[in-house]
Image: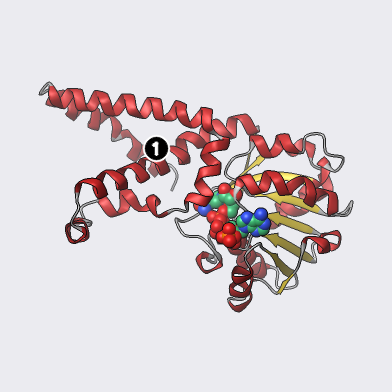
Amino acid sequence: MINNIYIIGVGLIGGSLALDIKNKRPDITVYGIDKSEQHLIEALELNVIDAKATLDDLDKADLVILSVPVDAAVELLPKVLDKVSDFGLVVDVGSTKLDICKVVENHFKRRNFLAMHPIAGTEFSGPKAAILDLFQHKTNIICEVEKTAFKLQEKALNLFSEIGMRMRYMNPEAHDKHIAYMSHLSHISAFMLGKTVIEKEKNERDIFDMAGSGFESTVRLAKSSPAMWTPIFKQNKENVIETLEGYIANLTQFKNMMKNDDFEGVYNEMKDTNYIKQILNGLK
Ligand code: NAP
């Protein structure tokens, strides 16, 4: 039975989880812990959390959700696990999974930890970015489920199913490799697209007037927080570099076809890539 939840990091993901859980299980009390006092005040005002708490309260926790940037998560997780009772479960929601799983692999309370990555989000941060139903029909990747005490994982996974997520199971190495392609590369691509346009189009009015041409939707992820993404790229450096090498090779090939007036090649390249429509339609 989950009577209380302590969310560490009451931002987009922690806050959205809080909203969904409070919506489905109004009997659960949600406490917030954050290094930003301002974010705690906002989370209280927005009813994202019911009350503030501190790390010293975690011995009373049924469930702790660690939702801070991944560098902070690696540092905090062993300390948080030290504090929870034998009946408390800690889950993290970080976008990388290998470093977080490694840092507690020999922790005496490893069975009180569940590693997960909800594949949902937006480009915004902080408690004001929290939205209801963010996790509806979204995938939640669970890593090393066999290392978590069965009774503890069961109650947490039931709760995450209740707010609309479907669970998928993966080892942390596979998670980090696949997510580098599916998420991390898209963010770098958006950041560098934004940079290229800002460098060239010195007149902001021109960018504003012409942004409707597909630019705005393609560059959306470039609004994301560097404080969150830098540690993700650092932790997943090898996999991300591999994706970049493939991407840069494709960009170079495309440029060379243009230079060589190989527009049949350009056409075929795009035609082949239209296959993405079928793949994405399969998701709906
Ligand atoms: P966010 O909106 O920036 O929220 C993170 C919150 O944690 C902020 O209030 C931040 O305060 C606080 N914080 C940072 N370091 C802390 C520490 N050491 N102790 C306590 N609080 C701390 O970030 P988010 O987008 O929710 O991301 C949280 C986690 O979810 C990350 O691990 C990320 O990889 C993962 N995730 C994100 C997405 C996404 O699309 N955004 C999707 C899935 C998973 P300050 O702002 O003052 O630093």
The quarter holding residue 123 reads bottom left
Residue count near mark 1 (Cα–Cα under 10 Å), binned few <14, some 14–19, many ≥20: few
The image quadrant where one finds ligand 1 is bottom right
The quarter holding residue 96 reads top right
Q: Nearer the viewer, residue 275 or 132?
A: 132
The residue sitting at 42% across, 37% down in the picture is 185
The quarter holding residue 146 reads top right
Q: Which residue is mark 1?
A: 279
Q: Position of residue 14 (x, y in %)?
A: 62, 60
The residue sitting at 21% across, 56% down in the picture is 207
The residue sitting at 52% across, 69% down in the picture is 128
- In the figure, is residue 151 to the left or right of 167? right
Examine the rendering and report whether any part of residue 231 can be seen: yes
- In the figure, is residue 254 to the left or right of 36? left
- In the figure, is residue 145 to the left or right of 170? right
Label 1 element class: helix
Residue lying furthest right in this view?
86
Q: Position of residue 83 (x, y in %)?
A: 84, 54
Q: Position of residue 172 (x, y in %)?
A: 64, 33
Q: Is residue 235 above or below residue 3?
A: above
The residue sitting at 38% across, 50% down in the picture is 222
Note whether ligand 1 is within 8 Å of mark 1: no
Q: Is residue 151 above or below residue 17?
A: above
- In the figure, is residue 51 to the left or right of 82? left
Which amino acid, by three-letter code, is at mark 1? Ile
Examine the rendering and report whether any part of residue 135 can be seen: no
Residue lying furthest left in this view?
261
